[in-house]
């Protein structure tokens, strides 16, 4: 009983990351401010997100020695920092795990930086 109480207290003190599996129409509403950014229409953003993460904020993919995080699959080698690549360039100045929650504000800011610097492959 005592270990259950301890576990319950730990669960309350350290809530799980609030991840989200978006639906297409719901995601369209959240990403509406991305429409037209860099000449990319909202349907192209939605298509790109579907093909990179399946609309799931907790998507993590290992790719040639680096890892990509979240809806936009933002890479830890250049754009964010994690414990895997300690010398990341971290251009977006953010921890990679921030791309795994349901708040897409920081994801969109970083995606715009990536588009400004590198462009994006759309559908």
Image (spheres, rainbow, N blue to C red):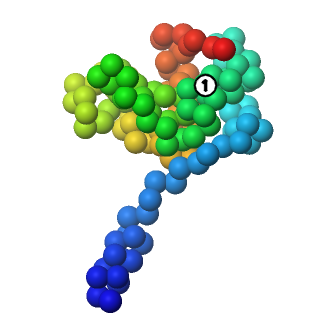
Position of 11 relative to 40 (above/below): below
Element type where label 1 sits in the image: helix
Number of numbered tags placed on the structure image: 1
Q: Which residue is mark 1?
A: 51
* Residue 92 visible from this viewpoint: no
* Residue 10 visible from this viewpoint: yes
Residue 84, image x, y percentages? 25, 33
Q: Which residue is farthest right?
A: 25
Q: Which residue is farthest left?
A: 86
Within the image, what quadrant is residue 103 found in? top right
Within the image, what quadrant is residue 104 found in? top right
Q: Which residue is painted at 42% across and 72% down in the image?
A: 12
Residue 120, image x, y percentages? 56, 13
Q: Nearer the viewer, residue 24 or 79?
A: 24
Q: Nearer the viewer, residue 96 or 112?
A: 96
Q: Local crowd at mark 1 within 10 Å, few (<14), some, or many (≥20)?
A: some
Q: Which residue is painted at 48% across and 10% down in the image?
A: 118
Name the quarter where the N terminus is drawn.
Answer: bottom left
Report the side of 101 relative to 9 (left or right).
right
Q: Nearer the viewer, residue 21 or 74?
A: 21
């Amino acid at each position: 009983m005592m270990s259950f109480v301890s576990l319950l207290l730990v669960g309350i003190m350290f809530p799980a990351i609030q991840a989200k599996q978006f639906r297409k129409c719901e995601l369209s509403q959240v990403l509406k401010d991305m429409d037209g950014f860099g000449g990319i229409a909202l349907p192209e953003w939605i298509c790109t997100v579907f093909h990179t993460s399946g609309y799931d904020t907790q998507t993590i993919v290992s790719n040639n020695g680096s890892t990509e995080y979240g809806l936009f699959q933002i890479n830890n080698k250049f754009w964010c920092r994690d414990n895997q690549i300690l010398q990341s360039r971290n251009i977006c100045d953010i921890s990679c795990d921030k791309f795994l929650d349901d708040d897409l504000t920081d994801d969109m800011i970083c995606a715009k930086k990536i588009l400004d610097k590198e462009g994006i492959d759309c559908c």
